Image (cartoon, rainbow, N blue to C red):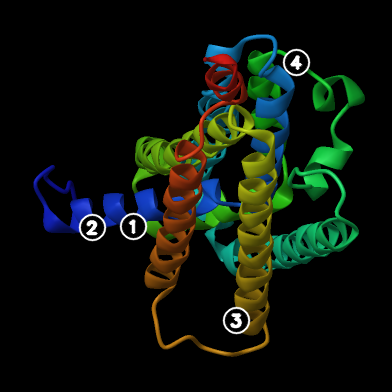
Amino acid sequence: MHTPPHSPALWAIAFSVFVLGLRHGADPDHLAAIDNLTRNSLSVRSRLSRFVGTLFAGGHSVMVLSIAALAGLFGSHISVHRDALETAGTWVSIATLFGIGAINVRQLMAGAGATIRGVKSVALPRALRAATSPFAALPVGLLFGLGFDTSSQIAAYSLALATAGGWLAGLGIGLVFSCGMAVTDTLDSLLVYRLCTRHPLELVRATRIWIIAVTVLAFVVGGYELAQVVGWRSPLPDLAVSGLLVASLLAVFAWTFRLAASTAPQDELGARGAAP
């Protein structure tokens, strides 16, 4: 039966999918890739480098929309395998999250390189990892969408929320999900841009805080997913947990952004020092 646009159920589904998109955009592997691409492109196209996250989300959305539409189209045929897909995708996600956390803990302890490290980024072609054009974020985002964890998550959401709705319902879910993802990914590149244009000493401090936050996020989400797989049931619904995680990340975004904004850029400081 067709649900009218003003239906509370429809808006509730849209809100849920949007929050899940925000949560997906906060994937530490997304943050690591966007961090790297933003830094690489800063000296080439400074203004556009601020929107590397938006471009990454655009490339990623091509796969998200394709998978969501296919899940909606063939939902009746693959819904019997939904639990298996979700479980397999969750295990891949757990391994990836703990891998990211371990890499960044080692990096923090060694005091090396003020950048977030990701697992998927290592598998990218060298040309894309070292690319200095902001537009490289489009194919990188597209390739990230090929990951089994992403594919299984999107398929599971579409099957759960667009039952018997066909490919248009699946496409709509994918679109709302992509919008949420684009918000988080864009905020990440804006934050990295702001950090990279601040005074070096403050950059090191603020960036370290950001890396710690992403590392903690990886371990928390990985631990939560692992607990769910082995049988623990959270007293809060998954949507509420996703909302709390996103809210926490946004709070760190805001705090780190404010910390960077409170310091003058290096050239501005130099100009002040030279003034009589």
Q: Which of 162 and 30 is in front in this view?
A: 30
How many residues crowd mark 3 within 10 Å: few (<14), some (14–19), many (20+)?
few
Left or right, 116 with reference to 231: right
Quote the CA–CA distance across marks 1 and 2.
Answer: 6 Å
Q: Nearer the viewer, residue 207 or 151?
A: 207
User: Which residue is label 2 attached to?
Assistant: 12
Q: Indicate the quadrant where residue 91 lies.
A: bottom right
Question: In this orientation, does residue 85 appear?
Answer: no
Quote the CA–CA distance across marks 1 and 3.
Answer: 20 Å
Residue 149, disc: none
User: Which residue is label 4 attached to?
Assistant: 132
User: Which residue is label 1 attached to?
Assistant: 16
Q: Nearer the viewer, mark 4 or mark 3?
A: 4
Residue at image coords 69%, 22%: 139
Quote the CA–CA distance across marks 4 and 3.
Answer: 40 Å
Q: Are marks 1 and 2 in contact (CB under 8 Å)?
A: yes
Q: Give the SS element for disc 1.
A: helix
How many residues crowd mark 1 within 10 Å: few (<14), some (14–19), many (20+)?
many
Residue at image coords 63%, 21%: 138
Quote the CA–CA distance across marks 1 and 4.
Answer: 36 Å
Left or right, 149 with reference to 273: right
Q: Indicate the quadrant where residue 235 lies.
A: bottom left
Amino acid type shown at disc 1: Ser
Amino acid type shown at disc 3: Gln
Amino acid type shown at disc 4: Thr
- Percent of width and height locating residue 78: 58, 55
